[in-house]
Amino acid sequence: MIKENLEKIRATLPEGVTLVAVSKTKPVSDLQEAYDASQRVFGENYPQEMRDKHEVLPQDIQWHFIGHLQTNKIKYIIQYVTLIHSIDTASLLEAVNKEAKKHDRVVDCLLQFHIALEETKFGLDLNEARQLLDSEEYKQMENVRICGVMGMGSFTDDMEEVRKEFKHLKSIFDTLKSDYFADQPQFKEISMGMSEDYPIAIEEGATLIRVGSKIFGARVYAR
C-alpha cells in the first residue's frame, strides 16, 4: 500500500518539487517499504527516534528534521541530518552552528515562519528574521547554511485561508531572496504543504512538501 500511495503522489508532482515522507512514529519496516519504492527523503520530528532509525536504515537516505528542535537534542542528529526545516530562533541557529562545527560539517537549514492562525505554532516573523540575518553573530556562523523558508498552514477546512498563508510565506521567501540571498543559489527552498493541503502549496510555490498520512496511513502515537 505504501508503494501505491507514493506512486500516486509522485504522479501529481511537478518538476522541482521534492516529496519529504513524514515518517515520525512509524516503524522501521514502513520506512524500508518506502525506501524499496525509491523514496529517499524522510522527515522526522523527534531527534532520538531519527537517530535510532538512521542507525538501522540504508545510509543513502536524506534525513530532514521537521519538528520543533530543542538545543539539547541537536547532538542526536547533527552528524547526518541533511536539512533542518525548523530554525525558529537565532539562538537555535547558533546552537546548530556550534554543534556542526564540532563535526566539521556545514548543515543546511530553513528559517521557520509563523504563518498560521494558531498561536501554538512556532516560527519567526519577517522582522525577527531580518534581525537574525543582520546580526554580527549570524555573519560569524560558518557551519550553517540558510537554504530557504518553512511554514505550517492553519489546521482548518478553509482552504482559502491556507492558500493566503502559503502566499504569505512565498512573499517572505521573495523578500529574503532579494534582500539577503540574491547571489546565493542555495537559497531556493520553500517547505510548505502537508497531506491535506500540499496541492495548494505546490500551486503557491512549494519546493518541499511534507506528506505523512497520505503515504503511511494515520499516525500511531505510542509515546
Image (cartoon, rainbow, N blue to C red):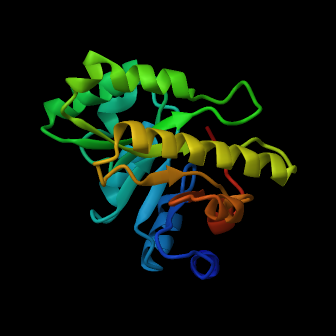
- In percent of the image, x 64 and y 76: which residue is there? 5
In the depicted structure, whether residue 172 falls above or below residue 191: above
Where residue 120 appears, as percent x and y from the top left, is 70, 26
Where residue 106 appears, as percent x and y from the top left, is 21, 41
Judging depth in this view, the residue of 16 and 83 nearest the camera is 16
Looking at the rendering, in which quadrant would you find the N terminus? bottom right
In the depicted structure, whether residue 182 falls above or below residue 39: above
- In percent of the image, x 35 and y 59: which residue is there? 62
Residue 178 visible in this rendered orientation of the protein: yes
Image position of 69 (left or right of 4):
left
Where residue 200 appears, as percent x and y from the top left, is 71, 61
Image position of 105 (left or right of 80):
left
Judging depth in this view, the residue of 199 and 129 nearest the camera is 129
In the depicted structure, whether residue 181 falls above or below residue 28: above
- Number of marks drawn: 0
Where residue 78 appears, as percent x and y from the top left, is 28, 38
- In percent of the image, x 15 and y 36: which residue is there? 103
Judging depth in this view, the residue of 199 and 167 nearest the camera is 167
Judging depth in this view, the residue of 15 and 5 nearest the camera is 15
Res 115 → quadrant: top right
Looking at the rendering, in which quadrant would you find the C terminus? top right
Residue that sits furthest to the right in the current view:
158
- In percent of the image, x 50 and y 60: which residue is there? 207
Residue 151 visible in this rendered orientation of the protein: no
Res 51 → quadrant: top left
